[in-house]
Structure formats: C-alpha cells, structure tokens
Image: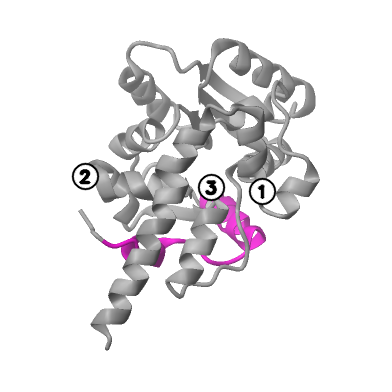
Amino acid sequence: MTGSMKPYYDRIYKGSMRSFLAGLEARIESGQGSFVVTANPEIFMMGKKHRQMDRALLDEHTMIVPDGIGIIRGGKTLGYRFEERIPGVEICEALLKYADEHHKSLYLFGAEKTVLEALVLRIRREYSGIVLAGSTDGYVKDRDRVFREITERQPDIVLVALGTPAQELLIYRYFSPERPGLYMGVGGSFDVLSGLKKRAPAFFIKYNLEWLYRITREPKRLKRFWDSNVRFLFEIRKEKHGNQRENR
C-alpha cells in the first residue's frame, strides 16, 4: 500500500462536472463499463489502511472525482488544482435526468427498506422514462449474490448505497470495463434523493460547509469527521513538509 496520497491524487479527475458527465454518458452509449468513486478524505484514509481499497483506488479503470472539500484543499496543499468540486449526490441527480430522457435502465442497491421504497416511488413519479431494472435494500444477507445477479442483468446504471468502503469493495470485486454499465458508490445519497432527508441549505453548499451542516444535524458524526477529515489534513501537511525536506 502507498504511504503517500499523491498516487491517489494523480488519478483524480480535475475538470468540470459538465465534462465529466458528458464522458460518462458517452461511455454508457458506447457500452463501456465505468466504476466511479466519489472521493472524500475518509476514502483516501481507508486506502492507506486497507490493501483492497488501495488497489481499487489505484486501478487504471477506476474513475475518481473530488467529492469532499477536504480533497480539494488537500490537493492544493500538494500542488494539485481542480476546476470544481463534484458532489456525488449531484452526479446521481444528473444521471437520473439522463436516464429518464434516454430511457436507460437503473438498478438501486442499498440503504434501508423505507428509504429505498421512497426513492423508487419518486423515480416512478418524476422520472417515468427510466427503466427500473430492480432494487434491493442494503440489509440482505448475501450482498455478493445480489451483486452477481445485478451484473448479469447488465443495467445501464447501478447506484450502490452501502457506505464506504463496503460499496466500493463490492463493486470492485465484480466490475469489468468490458461489461456495459456505470457503477457508482453513493453513500447516503439515497436519503437525499428519496426526499426523506434534506440536503444542506444553499448557503452551506455555496461555501463548501455541508460537512458542518451535517455535524450540527447529527453530532454523532463528529468523531467520524475527526478520524477522517482532520487526520487526513494532518497527513497531507506531513507529506508536504516531508517532500520539502527531501528537496532541500
């Protein structure tokens, strides 16, 4: 496993959301497989600890986008520049709109049953052009069996809401770039997409403070924020200073 964050940063998409989405749509239309990781500090920290996560992030077929503001700021510290942050929930919304307009098939896997049912209802009500290939909540006993069945159906888009790193590792086990379909781990996005949980107000989104809004709404997230985001920034600063000493 890598001791540096730079190999991960080398692989992150650094352009605009608009061009990234255009690329995803082109891959779907051409039948190419896509595996999208929406990176936040927690995911990169897990990559440093877990060999399979490290392999998934460094795989040449994995597409990584900068979801968390911590990723953007950490990248700037190490000399990387990004055109903009690309939140996973916004990718999901764009994919639903695209699938609706072009009658693409969609499979939903993960989240609690009530959340999943609410999301399915919303899709049927607001995105009638989507071909819903199926849906399974995240509490099934054999996730691998379910995922094998999903890949056999070859839906155009598969959104997986099992939390990190479970969703990324599951996708990585079965993903093949030669098999059609876009696979993306979406964390808690089903809660927002279903309408059962509101996204942060516009002010927090504009100033990249969604993390603060989530903590104020759910104080139990504070320890998780410390273990991932704060420690991540410490790692970034340590790496920067280490590189500076080596270059002297």
> What range of the chain is rendered magenta?
4-29
Q: Nearer the viewer, mark 2 or mark 1?
A: 1
Q: Give the x, y percent position of residue 27.
A: 51, 53
> Which one is in front, 139 or 233?
233
Residue picked out by circle 2: 51
User: Rounded to the nearest whole Å, what is the CA distance between mark 2 and mark 1?
Assistant: 31 Å
Residue that mark 3 sits on: 28
Q: Does the magenta stretch include residue 16?
A: yes
Report the front residue among 205 and 158: 205
> How crowded is the residue under tag 1: few (<14 C-alpha within 10 Å), some, or many (20+)?
some
Picture quadrant of residue 22: bottom right
Mark 2, residues whose alpha carbon is within 10 Å: few (<14), some, or many (≥20)?
A: few
Left or right, 152 with reference to 108: left
Could you say which quadrant of the image residue 105 lies in? top right
Identify the residue position indicated by label 1 in the image.
209
Q: For the residues carrying marks 2 and 3, which lies nearer the camera in this image?
A: 2
Q: Is mark 3 on a helix, strand or loop?
A: helix
**Can residue 181 be seen from the camera position used here?**
no
Q: Label 3: how many residues lie within 10 Å, few (<14), some (14-19) or many (20+)?
A: some
The first of marks 2 and 1 along the sequence is 2
**Main SS, magenta residues:** helix
Instruction: Please say whether residue 53 is visible from this viewpoint.
Output: yes
Q: Residue 82 at x, y = what percent?
A: 56, 68
| Mark earlier in primary sequence (2, 3) | 3
Query: Does dot 1 land on a helix, a strand or a loop?
Result: loop
Tag on residue 198? none
| Residue at horizontal 73 percent and vertical 24 percent from the top | 195
> Residues at badges 2 and 1 in contact (C-beta under 8 Å)?
no
Element class at badge 2? helix
